[in-house]
């Protein structure tokens, strides 16, 4: 007995049927029609989606003598391993602030392809941190003093950089809202449409954090990095800084890169290819990814950690652009006092209004 082949609609996912009159495949759910060739192309997409792409490496290995004088330091607290040259050394972990010990001569790992050199020095980083903290009324006194700022460290954070061409078919739900009224009622009419777009998007150097010690959300918050300013890696760029060793594999990093590529395709089509609707939401997306490859890069970040009431706070600044992120703890006593003062002020105003009304 032969198997029955069921083909899915690229728009809504429903089962399509061959329409004799139109001589095309037609979806009975959304009324979309497709040529046989178009459906074959959709099936090819399914076999080569962004989730299944094989990323090719353009990496290289260390040359003879290139790592001489480079040492690995290990943090016994968080498990982090950083690399520094003989002139820099390392005494504390840039991720948790605890002491590190020399583990031995650096060797082994994949050689970085690219590096973005630091554009902002330690003085600029300290000034940016002070500016971020200034004027914060509820920040605890002495939370981040000058001595703590001296511990700010310049770190080259490892990243996997993914590039590819993505030919995409994206379907959306589009809503058009019409409003009108008469002397008795106000009317609202909402029409929902199936919107279909397709096209190509090229991605260059989509970053995926390759360090488990720094939070992915924190790293992505200080983006973007201008990869056009990246240069071929040379150990000379490490002088005065430390570099983290990657501990996230390419396969693990590609999962995050795939998510970012998929979201970027949707955003690109929604913002630039869909017009005339009040609301637009994603329905379905198919992508055929070609020319996919990755590179290993080091991105510059200034980091400082501090602990307050048993909780560690990490602050990061983009060492190329100066973009800064980090949460600040709240002094609960100050917050309660301010809340009490505001409540008292509101109460006095209310009492004054009542008194005025009584007089009137």
Image: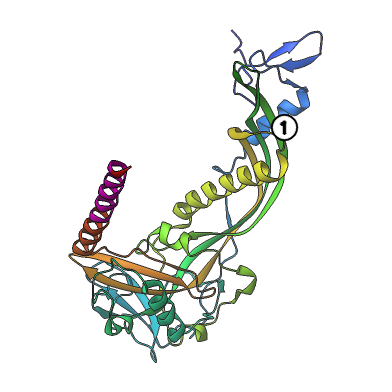
Counting from the top left corner in percent of width and height, residue 202 is at 69, 53
Q: Is residue 85 above or below residue 137?
A: below
Q: Of 346 and 175, which appears nearest the observer?
A: 346
Q: Kindly identify the residue that appears in the image at 56 percent across and 77 percent down.
A: 233
In the rendered view, does 267 fall on the left or right side of 255?
right
Image x and y of residue 343, in percent: 25, 53
Compare residues 85 and 137 and report the one nearer the observer.
137
- Which of the 4 image quadrants contains residue 25? top right
Q: Secondary structure at mark 1?
A: helix
The quarter of the picture where the C terminus appears is: top left
Magenta stretch in the rendered image = 344-358
Q: Magenta part mainly helix, strand or loop? A: helix
Of 342 and 204, which appears nearest the observer? 342
Which color scheme did the rendering employ for the protein?
rainbow
Q: For this rendering, which residue is in front, 94 or 295?
A: 94
Q: Which residue is mark 1?
A: 41
Residue 99 placement: quadrant: bottom left
Position of 292 with respect to 23 (left or right) is: left
Vertically, is 136 above or below 23? below
Q: Is residue 278 visible?
A: yes
Residue 347: x percent and y percent?
24, 50
């Amino acid at each position: 007995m032969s198997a029955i082949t069921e083909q899915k609609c690229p728009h809504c996912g429903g089962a399509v049927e061959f329409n004799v009159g139109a001589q095309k495949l037609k979806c009975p759910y959304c009324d979309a029609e497709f040529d046989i060739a178009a459906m074959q192309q959709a099936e090819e997409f399914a076999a080569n989606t962004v989730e299944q792409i094989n990323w090719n490496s353009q990496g290289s290995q260390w040359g003879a003598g290139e790592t001489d004088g480079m040492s690995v330091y290990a943090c016994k607290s968080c498990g982090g391993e950083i690399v520094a040259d003989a002139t820099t050394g390392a005494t504390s972990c840039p991720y948790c602030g605890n002491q590190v010990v020399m583990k031995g001569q650096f060797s082994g790992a994949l050689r970085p392809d690219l590096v973005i050199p630091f554009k902002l020095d330690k003085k600029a980083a300290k000034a940016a941190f002070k500016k971020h903290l200034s004027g914060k009324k509820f920040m605890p006194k002495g939370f981040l003093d000058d001595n703590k700022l001296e511990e700010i460290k310049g770190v080259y954070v490892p990243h996997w950089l993914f590039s590819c061409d993505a030919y995409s078919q994206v379907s959306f739900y589009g809503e058009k809202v019409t409003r009108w009224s008469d002397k008795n009622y106000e009317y609202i009419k909402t029409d929902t449409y199936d919107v279909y777009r397709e096209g190509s998007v090229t991605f260059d150097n989509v970053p995926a954090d390759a360090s488990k010690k720094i939070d992915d959300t924190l790293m992505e918050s200080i983006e973007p990095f201008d990869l056009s300013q990246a240069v071929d890696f040379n150990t000379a760029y490490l002088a005065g800084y430390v570099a983290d060793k990657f501990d996230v594999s390419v396969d693990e990093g590609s999962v995050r890169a795939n998510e970012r590529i998929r979201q970027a395709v949707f955003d690109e089509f929604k913002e630039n290819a869909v017009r005339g609707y009040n609301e637009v939401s994603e329905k379905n997306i198919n992508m055929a990814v070609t020319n996919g490859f990755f590179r290993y890069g080091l991105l510059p970040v200034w980091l400082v950690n501090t602990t307050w009431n048993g909780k560690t706070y990490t602050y990061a600044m983009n060492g190329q652009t100066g973009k800064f992120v980090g949460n600040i703890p709240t002094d609960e006593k100050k917050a309660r006092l301010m809340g009490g003062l505001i409540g008292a002020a509101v109460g006095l105003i209310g009492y004054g209004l009542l008194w005025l009304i009584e007089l009137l």
